[in-house]
Amino acid sequence: AIGNATTVCDLSGKPLSALPRLTRSFGAEYTHGLRGGREVYARGDVVARSAVYGDPSDSQYTRIDGYTIVNASVGLKHAGPWEISLWARNLLDAQYMQNLTVQAGNSGLIVGTPNDPRTVGIALRAALAEDAELYHFHDPELIPMALTLKALKPSAAIIYDVHEDYPSMML
């Protein structure tokens, strides 16, 4: 038996939700050697997705328009232990929803997650050969590296510092 909160519908022939019909990506890097074992570089990548429905219902309220994201960085790399770069994610500050879905229970509630805004930063990387007492991370995607670093250098202090207020960034 089907309860009151369950909706039955025929989805034959409809596209899979959250799966764009078309995704395109392109990346490029240019490097130029300098004296003293240094090199400058510029990198860029572009990712574009076509529109999708965030929910199997294909409701117009869960349609996520297509979008394009551009990321870029420029930097100076030394043949030895260091590299410095200026980087940007979502350089053109594209505005889009990462997901939209209808909540269960026929409440009419639709929830979603907005994209990350343009983010610009400076990175200084040093080789692990440098025996530091303290390593400091800001980016959540570097947490696996921080855990690996702690395993390799158990006496070193590892700090993960968060600047984003994720709850306030949500709808």
Image (tube, rainbow, N blue to C red):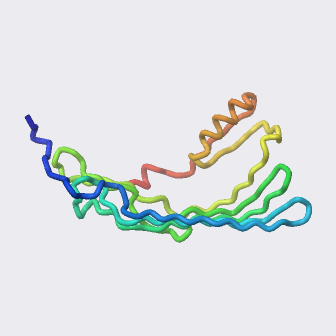
- Quadrant of the image containing the C terminus: bottom left
- Residue 77 position by quadrant: bottom right
Report the residue that reaches farthest toward the right.
Answer: 36
At 24% from the left and 48% from the top, the residue drawn is: 103
At 88% from the left and 59% from the top, the residue drawn is: 37
Examine the rendering and report whether any part of residue 170 can be seen: yes
- Residue 32 position by quadrant: bottom right
In the visual, does 53 lie left or right of 7? Answer: right
Q: How many marks?
A: 0
In the visual, does 98 lie left or right of 153? Answer: left
In the visual, does 125 lie left or right of 148? Answer: right
Q: Position of residue 16 (x, y in %)?
A: 30, 54
At 68% from the left and 65% from the top, the residue drawn is: 29
Report the residue that reaches farthest toward the left.
Answer: 1
At 91% from the left and 65% from the top, the residue drawn is: 35
Tell me if residue 159 comes above or below residue 88 in the rendering.
Answer: above
Tell me if residue 139 comes above or below residue 58 in the rendering.
Answer: above
Q: Position of residue 65 (x, y in %)?
A: 35, 67
- Quadrant of the image containing the N terminus: top left
Examine the rendering and report whether any part of residue 171 can be seen: no
In the visual, does 70 lie left or right of 76? Answer: left
Q: Nearer the viewer, residue 122 or 65?
A: 65
Q: Nearer the viewer, residue 112 or 22?
A: 22
Report the residue that reaches farthest toward the bottom.
Answer: 92
Q: Position of residue 74 (x, y in %)?
A: 70, 66
